[in-house]
Amino acid sequence: MEIPVLNVQDYIHNNQDTDDDEDDAGVIRAKQYLENTYGKDWIERPLLLKELWTQKELRLLTPNGLLTMTNLTIPYFTNATNPTALIPDGYDTVSNIIQGMIYDQKPYKIGSQYIVQHDPTLLFKEIIPNDNNDNNQLFLTKLFGNHFSPEKITGKSIFEFKNGIKLKLPGTTTVPVFIANTITTTSKDKNKATTATTTQKKEEFLTGLHCEPIANLAVQLWGSRTWTLVNPIHTWKLRPRIATDGRSYYPSSISKNDLTRKIPRYRITTNPGDAVWLPTWTYHQVEYTTTRKNENSKMISFSQLSIGASIFHFRPYDYIRRNPLFALLLIPSLLKELIGMKTQ
């Protein structure tokens, strides 16, 4: 299926002196376009946001920038070619992990919120770069709701009742950074009857088809990713099952052949500056699919790297409304995560 598309730069003012009325006008026009083109329920389906940001150089969320993170130690996956791997099995500095990916062609993968937790300012400095103003943040907040602030990540939001009592709210937004690449290995098989032949085997890094009880705005910062997305109305055709570690995560056990033949789906590729909106409970699969042309080129190795960040945020109404059975089954896990007993 063809995914709905919004070119964000057509509706964002880049002038620092822009006032709130003009900001609202841009969002109003964007909503009108989405409703007129895709229907009033456009937010119920995936949406591709083109050119969410146009900043050409990032500081830290680049291969070179990540190589400087020698003091930040995080969990990571040592073999990203295994789509069933759900729990990181390695622990090292960001710098060492990236070195292994780029220079040693290791099949590593990072999927960790600790990078942004360590420096929450990265949300606006690089994940939603805004050229020294906050128009991008305001645009997203007014389009999708107030989920895009450091307070939502750190858990410092305050809700004040009419009687003056203040309640500190837990963090409901997390921003994991996802980094992986593709390894192509070459093996030679000599044919005795003729001449030697060369066979290439491509190992794809893949996040298997799954859904989660949160909404996601997935931003592409470097390289590219290819997404397979399934509208939540088709959830029960995907043979969902509960994650083996009890997390708030539902993988699909449908075969690749049945997915291809029987399930309507979107298939898109996000490039730097793009973002994809995934409503709560949207099944998705992510492939890191690029091709290295020169194994000895540092620059080609850098271009192999895919760096993205997902703005995961909890939307209680959608959580219950869109999938009431899953919502009930996950309440114990969600409570454990909110009080800090489960962090994975």
Image (spheres, helix red, strand yellow):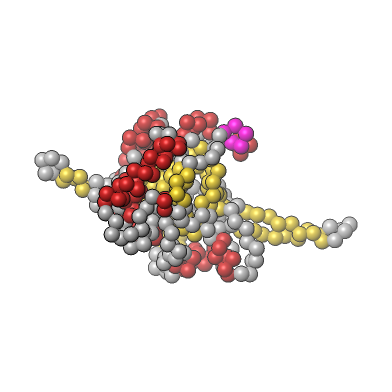
Residue 182 screen position, x and y as percent? 59, 57
- Judge from the rendering whether residue 73 lies leftward or rightward of residue 288; answer left or right: left
Q: Is residue 187 left or right of residue 19?
A: right
Which residue is painted at 10% across and 40% down in the image? 163
The number of callouts visible is 0
Q: Using the rendered image of the protein, determine whether residue 64 is visible from the camera's viewpoint.
A: yes
Q: Residue shown at 48%/35% (left/top)?
A: 231
Residue 94 sits inside the magenta stretch:
no
Name the foreground residue: 93 vs 228: 228
x and y, in percent, of residue 87 in the image? 47, 49
- The reply, left or right, for residue 144 in relation to residue 68 is left
Q: Main secondary structure of the magenta part?
A: helix
Q: Name the spot of residue 47 as percent of width and height, x first.
A: 45, 43
Residue extending farthest left: 163
Residue 53: % across, % down: 42, 56
What segment is highlighted magenta in the picture? 259-263
Q: Nearer the viewer, residue 46 or 176?
A: 46
Q: Is residue 256 left or right of residue 54?
A: right
Quadrant location of the N terminus in the rendered image: top right
Work out whether residue 337 can be spotted. no
> Residue 203: which quarter of the image?
bottom right
